[in-house]
Amino acid sequence: MKMAGLNWPGVGIPGGGGVWLLLLGLAVLHPVPRVPLSAQVAVIRAERLMTSAEDGIVGPRFVVVRGGRITSVTIQRPSGLPPAALEFEAEFVTPGFIDARTTLGLSGLHRGDDDRDETSGPNQAHLRAVDAFDLSDPLVGHSLRSGTTTVQTGPGDANSIGGQAGIFKLHGETVAGTSVRFPSAVVFSLDESAKLTYGAARQFPSTRMANVGLIRQALVDADRYREQRSGDDPPSRDLRKEALAKVLEREIPALVSAERADEIATALRLAGEFGFEVVLVGATQVRVALPLMLEANVPVLLGPPGKAALRWEAGDLLPQTASELRDRGIRFALVTGDDEDAAQASLLAMARSAIRRGLTLEQALEAITISPARILGLDADLGSVEEGKVADLVLFDGNPGVASTRVAAVLVEGTAAYVRGH
Amino acid sequence: MRTRIAACLLYSLGFLPLNLPETGMAQEIAIQGARILTMEGRTIQSGTLLIRDGKIAAVGPNVTIPEGARVIAAEGLTAMPGIVDAEGRAPGHGIRGLEGPMRAELIAGDFFDPYGRDYRPERTLKDLVEWGVTSINVKLTETNVFDGVSSVVKLHAPTTYDDHFVKYRAALRVNLGERPRSGEGRFPTTRMGIVGMVRENFIKAQEYQKRWEEFAEDEEEDKAPPPRNQKLEHLAAALRGEIPVMMHAVEPMDIETALRIADEFNLRIILTASSMLPEALVPELLERDIPVVLGTYFAHINNHIEEQFGFKYETAAMLADRDVPVAFGGLGGETKFLSLNAGIAVQNGMEHQKALEGLTIIPARMLGVDDRIGSLAVGKDADLILYRGDPLEITSPVEKVFIGGIMVYERKPFDPTYHDMKKGGGS
Amino acid sequence: MRRPHGIFGLCSLPFLVFSQPATATGQDLFISGATVYTMGPAGVLADGDVLIRDGKIAQVGVSLSAPPGVPVIDGDGRFVLPGLIDAHSHIATQDERGGGSDRHEQGQRVNTGLRILDSVNPQYKWLHSALEGGVTVLLVTPGSNATYGGQIVVIKTPPKPTVEEMILKVDGQTKMSMAATMGTGTSEMREWFHKGREYLAKWDRWEEGGREGPEPTRDLQLEGIAKQLTGEFVTHIHAQTAIEMQYALKMAREFGLTVNIEHGFDGWKMVDDIKNAGVDITFGPMIYAFANEAFYTPGILAREGVKVALTMDSASDFEKHHLHHAQIAVRFGMDPMDALRSVTILPAEMLRVDDRVGSLEVGKDGDAVILDGDPMSTFTHVLFTIVEGEVVFERSGGGS
């Protein structure tokens, strides 16, 4: 298993007895006993199921969950289920949504809780998302309730080098318990954020070229540090360089925000110069930079169409972008990113907006499930409803692409992390 | 004696110091053999211009040259009236204390400083004259809403300072649009604030006007006159139609605002810097007889003006073709490049003759000074330029410039050695 | 030179990975029967033809004929020039409203490690207006607010998705500013050049010691300065007044720099100094309305054999007026042919790209401008701008 060594919390919690039949989508909810909504075994009848696997959206299916994993997906109701198995019924079931770039848990609902950007200097490579991730932030619960089960979250884009991102589940008791991978990436910003942060006060960097110059020097220094640390007379530890060394070693990728085509080109130029792995974030103008993208084969995380998108594009080109990326074989996912409005954004809302703008339901759901799972290298366990995968599931009372449809329940690792009305 | 005074003045002005032309204030000067662009509806292919006492005494193909007149051979040269900047900055600007949104009391001519005190060489009169400019309708700022009244000045005065002035109070200036907005949280910070201020003050001026009219009509002898208000006085003059209002209006919305204000207060307006004028507004302009001043294209280089990002080259041709009077102005930028800009207007479709008129008679007319300047006609001031070549070709140098019959510039081979001696001032 | 080429050259290579033009295959074009200013040894051809094949000039001469299948532009009554070059601009580094400028780094005074190519956004629309003016090659330089502005890039004008595809020449140039350094200027420059020398020496010792021991630490800023010191980079010095230019010459002498003076308005005051120093001048823009005396400078210097390029110094759409600007120089005494050389072959030589552009000669890039009249007339229009055989601008209603 790819994710060996990870401690999956929430799996195997002893279940209480009884059968909970939730007739979701029928607008009639049976009275639910007040007992913990967790179980060792659960069976979900999905009127329709988005597998996010080869067969896409399929007709009625029974999904059986045991010990936090999906053990079967069948057309017929499987036999031999323990009598204590939890039963769910839903109009539509999808894999748990994965947000491959967000500032969730750092951004904070309230101003005082905003820990995204340490603006005391443009290089903050040593800062760690894990030290600011707040599971109790109301926005975390909000995201979970809208179906997001896994996030890669980290510092914002206000610095040239923002710090280290991590991958977390949104349901759990402790940060350590929810942590899937840390660090998972180092956040870089090539858009205008950093120069706006410092340029206003005429501090360095106030231009794009300076932003890049700063990043290059930091990488050159880290490269030297890396060599020296493995030598006879290793220098004392430097946390900034250490983090960047991981990027240079291709242990973790660089999560680079770049909106305009020239910024994307700069990201690839840097990757070419230093040989690291890039995941692009934002990438409003990715279509313009397509020739380079084809050559470089880097994944793209498309953010919400904020003001930046309007500035750099004649209109909203997401559907074209998505279909073109897919046709060209460039991996992409939808993310909430570090947008001003991202705090309120949810992946579900983004997927719906993408559907309104021309994506099919299946395409939109793929872009928030299996695609991000692959980009984050989590697809052995997450991103689709298939036998053997972790049971992160979202249960809807109707077509998830429609605004009136509600999330009825969210399962995280087989545990009912959220059930509507409870 | 008079000649000597003139010579001294010339020296102090920075015109041709040391190599003052001998002509000075000769009684009569005959410019012979030039192609003469009169701007009076005719071009004389080869003619003579007779100057007497600073005025044009005769112009035509067959002018008898009086005995004793100084003859200037001008075969192969082209004569045209001196260029009139329809709205420009005064040389020697840089005066402090002009700021404030409502400065209608200012008279730009009061700040006209021909004495070359400003060390910046680009601002000297000599530089402008070398490019053929002889008069400027001087203004003060682009950032005050009410910017006072402009004054038409000549770049040379034969005897006293006052001789510079062709018209002391030429036009009331109002700046609309982006630039007069205060960035400092002081009123006005929005376009609607600017317009509010303009309307409020014109309404005050209407009342002021009424008080004075009532006072004048009042039979009662001992009644005290209403208090004088310099600002409102200038606005009242505009309301009475005595002076036009030059409205700096760049973007289409600002141009419409200018029309709206003109209609409300029955003002005679001149639009300035309006190169973004939409064609749909042309009938509105024609209906109200509104002329337009277009900035020199290169104006925006030193000065951030809105126009630089939306300057439309075709506007001059579009307006001129539909008989809207078009004049060229330095506006916030460089008066010296007026002819260059008119040439670029021709490149972009403007009729050649109309471009020349836009440098001369049209600005003179719109400012009400066409009785003295703007064309080569008998009785007018002898302000003229002799070009070698088409005046609108950038490569054509100015050979001679006369202001009030005095030759204030004559082209000489450039001698760096001589100029080098005065390098302290930069020129 | 052994050290920096080996080390620094290598370091700057990797990002050239993407610099291969996407449109490697140029196009074919035949221009027939025009007045052709070759700006090369062939001079002016009264009834000349130009054949471009695969984006390169294949033939220039009279009485040529178009090979079958090659598109023809009728040059009758028209004038052909090589694509114009502006050796100093800030184009594509700020947005259409003058905002978001990425050309002046305000945060520090020494920026030799920065590269303007990281700031160029090919989507800014002013590149199109340069094409309208017939400008096909532009040097893009950082601004002059900092002592050391940063590294320069030379691009072909037609906008491409990314700057990599536009680059004609990367590196090789850096920008310094005298204006920003008056006062403590010279001492500040000396200090950094000394640091640069020490940096070079450190690498030298390491190289000479057979690369034994740890490699010296790489510093991008000092690396930039080192390249100036070794002459690998031409040092473009922003100097407008005579005394600034004198400082520039002083620095050049003291540190053995290869210097190109930018602006040079006071050139007329120090003609002999410039001649003796053998520096080239990128002069302008005259539209800044400096003293008229300054306008005589390009003519005087050209007559004295100094290489002068004329520049519009554009951050927005002034490039459209590159020829108008040359006409101002002619008004103030420059020979018209010298003026045309100043916007074609001379800047090509100064930017060391004359193997590719600057004149209509066989083997060079098929970059040309077709005008409807004399290049020295204000009223003349650019009808076609051609880059590597491709028509990249065509005047509406005025074409063939």
Image (spheres, coloured by chain):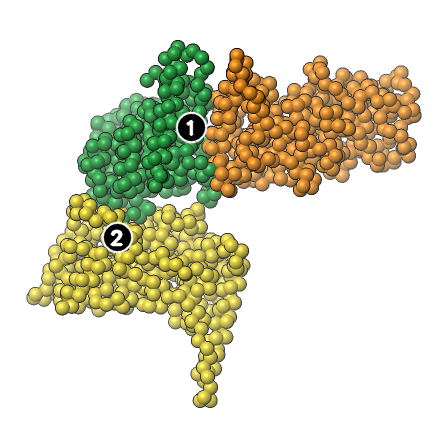
Chain colours: A orange, B yellow, C green
Q: Is residue B15 above or below residue C100?
A: below
- Compared across the picture, whether B4 is left or right of C23 comes to left
- Compared across the picture, whether A134 is left or right of A161 comes to right
Q: Quadrant of residue C228?
A: top left
In the foreground, A244 or B408: A244
Q: Residue at x 54, y 33 (%)?
A: A122
- Image spot of residue C339 (x, y percent): 25, 38
- Image spot of residue A348 (x, y percent): 71, 33
Residue B347 in view here: no
Q: Residue at x 18, y 62 (%)?
A: B8
Circle 1 chain: C
- Image spot of residue C199 (x, y percent): 39, 23
Q: Residue at x 30, y 28 (%)?
A: C255
Q: Residue at x 42, y 28 (%)?
A: C221
Please give the label number shown on residue B127: 2
Circle 2 chain: B
In the foreground, B186 or B197: B186
Q: Quadrant of residue C22?
A: top left
- Image spot of residue A151 (x, y percent): 68, 28
Check disc 1 and report the residue beneath it: C221
Mark 1 Cα shell of 10 Å, populated few (<14), some (14-19), many (≥20): some
Q: Is residue B48 above or below residue A32?
A: below
**What is the three-letter code of the residue carrying label 1?**
Gln
Could you give the CA–CA distance between mark 1 and mark 2, rounded to whole angstroms? 43 Å
Question: From the image, which quarter does the C terminus of chain C lie in?
Answer: top left
